[in-house]
Image (cartoon, rainbow, N blue to C red):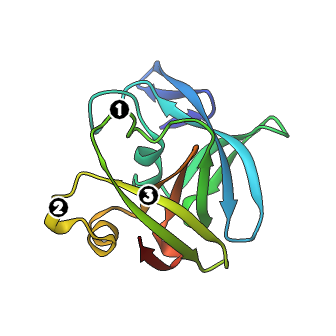
Amino acid sequence: MVVSAGENSFLRKGKATLKVEKFKCRANVHFSTGGSLDVHFFLGHQCETHPGPETMMDVLNSDRTFVPIEDILMNEVLLIGKTRIVYLELPEAGVGLEGKDLEELPVTIELVTGETLRGSFPTDLPPESRRASDYLNLMPQYICLQSNPKWLVINKGYVLSVKQG
């Protein structure tokens, strides 16, 4: 069971306490309420599902409904419901796709909030399947959009339309 959240998580197994080291990843979270928050997400140095560190995509596409974040302005740890996240802006590379040999699929995305986002989906889909419809239907709930110089992580539940090109 988790005893505390934050930069370190503590798991209790019997009488022994196991400490799980985390590192921070900064993001600006845009919520369905129209507000946004400058936060740190806590990521593991080792991911449970693949080799290497945990990424934002791992956290957002996990089966966890709530994730701990640190509100940078208030300097406090909160649990936020992932379903109310419309998208994240990452000021630095942090989605876990850096350095991979991926093709870019240019798109314009209209969100249900009325916002328009432009950029490219990074994809390794074969050329015959390199369409926005394939990308959207094959990818998990949270998807990446490279919008130089930032990366955006978008909740597909808030996507109204996508135009390729």
Q: Residue at x 55, y 64 (%)?
A: 118
2 or 3: tag closer to the N-terminus: 3
Q: Could you say which is closer to the camera, residue 1 or residue 121?
A: 121
| Residue 64 relative to residue 83: left or right | left
In this rendering, is residue 152 above or below 96? below
3 or 1: tag closer to the N-terminus: 1
Secondary structure category for the residue under label 3: strand
| Residue 127 - label | 2
* The residue positioned farthest toward the front in the image shown: 165
Question: Which image quadrant is residue 25 in?
Answer: top right
Give the residue at mark 1.
99
Question: Which image quadrant is residue 133 in?
Answer: bottom left
Secondary structure category for the residue under label 2: helix
Q: At which x and y percent is residue 122?
A: 36, 52
Give the residue at mark 3.
120
The answer for how far apart the CA atoms under marks 2 and 1 are is 20 Å
Q: At which x and y percent is residue 124?
A: 23, 51
Few, some or many residues within 10 Å of mark 3 (<14, 14–19, 20+):
many
Secondary structure category for the residue under label 1: loop
Q: Residue at x 64, y 54 (%)?
A: 80
